Amino acid sequence: MEYDKKFKILVLNFYKDINYFEYFSRRSKNDNIWGVIKDYKNVWFKRIKDSLKILFNNRITLSNDFILRDVDHINDFIEALKEAKQFCLEDKNENKN
């Protein structure tokens, strides 16, 4: 979590390492050798395509869902939001004085 007092922006960062073969692979356990080869070919094509996007556009876009699986995850997320709220309240009180 980062708070920029100058611009009054609170940023919550969520990080995820992407492994192309795990993220984009559509292979199943029942695939034969041709299915495996086709999947590797598709993943390599996607890697090359995204590399060219990064080279020419300076970015690629990936999206993912944020899933809270149980009460502990929800409580941790609520605690992070409460901490962020506290930063904002402290800054607001600091600016009043």
Image (cartoon, rainbow, N blue to C red):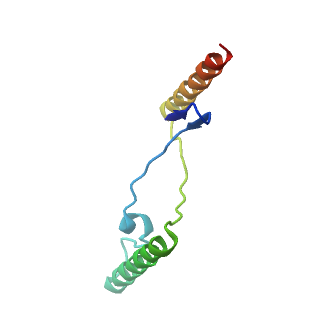
Q: Where's residue 76, x and y in %?
A: 49, 30
The residue at 52%/62% (across/down) is: 62
In which quadrant will I find the C terminus? top right
How many numbered marks have been drawn onto this rendered protein structure?
0
Left or right of 92? Residue 55 is: left
Farthest-out residue, bottom: 34
Q: Is residue 91 left or right of residue 2?
A: right
Residue 48 rendering spot, x and y as whole percentages: 40, 78
Question: Which residue appears at 40% of the width and 74% of the height?
Answer: 47
58 to the left or right of 34: right
> In the depicted view, which residue is nearer to us: 5 or 86?
5
- In the rendering, at what x and y percent does residue 88 appear? 61, 25
Whether residue 82 is situated above or below residue 62 in the rendered picture = above
25 or 17: nearer the viewer:
17
- Residue shown at the point (50%, 66%) measured from the top left: 59
Q: Determine which quarter of the picture holds residue 84.
A: top right
Query: In x, y percent, where is residue 37?
Result: 34, 83
Question: Quadrant of the rendered structure where residue 27 is?
Answer: bottom left
User: Measuring 51% from the left and 66% from the top, which residue is drawn there?
Assistant: 60
